[in-house]
Each structure stands twice: as structure tokens, then as C-alpha cells.
Image (cartoon, grey):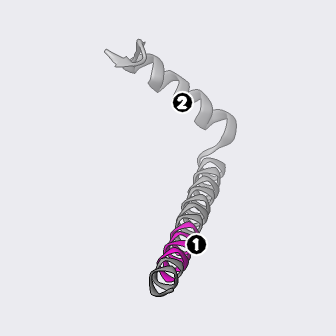
């Protein structure tokens, strides 16, 4: 039993080979860089969502103002 039909033993062997090839310090740096990239991506998505929500609110306000203006006329 493992991940995607790969046994735990096979995963451990692959992990040991990767550690031997790259070294633990380099793997730590790669992990840190990957974490920073994911954090930046999440922030960009959040900023985009906030901008979209702000634009949506502006459009709703404009529609409400126009309908009020038309109902007064």
C-alpha cells in the first residue's frame, strides 16, 4: 500500500537516492524556494479576487444609480 500503487519501500529508496544526489542542504533550499513561490502565487490569486470583487461592487453601484435615476424621471 502506498501512493498511486508505489510501495512505501520504493518511495523510501527514491527519497534516499534524491538525498544522495542533491544533498539535504540543497533540498532544504529547494523546499524553501518552492514554499515562497506558492506563497507568492496565493497572494496574487487573493489580490486578483479582491480586485474582481471591487470591480463587481462598482458595477452594482453604477447599475443601482442608473435605475434610481430612471425611476425618478
The numbered disc on residue 20 is none
Query: What residue appears at the point 60 percent right and 27 percent down from the top-left corner?
Result: 17
Disc 1: which residue: 55
The quarter of the picture where residue 55 lies is bottom right
Question: Which secondary structure is most common in the magenta stretch?
Answer: helix
The quarter of the picture where residue 12 lies is top left
Q: Nearer the viewer, residue 19 or 49?
A: 49
58 up-or-down from 24: above or below: below
Query: What residue appears at the point 52 percent right and 71 percent down from the top-left corner?
Result: 50
Q: Nearer the viewer, residue 8 or 37?
A: 37
Q: Look at the numbered discs 2 and 1 and tell me whether their residues touch, using CB distance below 8 Å.
A: no
Q: Nearer the viewer, mark 2 or mark 1?
A: 1
As helix, strand or loop, the secondary structure at mark 1 comes to: helix
Does the magenta-highlighted stretch encompass residue 64? yes
Query: What residue appears at the point 45 percent right and 81 percent down from the top-left corner?
Result: 71
34 up-or-down from 70: above or below: above
Amino acid at each position: 500500500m502506498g501512493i498511486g500503487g508505489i510501495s512505501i519501500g520504493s518511495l523510501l529508496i527514491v527519497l534516499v537516492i534524491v538525498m544522495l544526489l542533491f544533498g539535504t542542504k540543497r533540498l532544504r533550499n529547494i523546499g524553501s524556494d518552492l514554499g515562497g513561490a506558492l506563497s507568492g502565487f496565493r497572494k496574487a490569486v487573493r489580490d486578483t479576487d479582491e480586485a474582481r470583487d471591487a470591480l463587481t461592487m462598482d458595477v452594482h453601484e453604477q447599475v443601482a444609480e442608473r435605475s434610481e435615476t430612471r425611476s425618478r424621471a
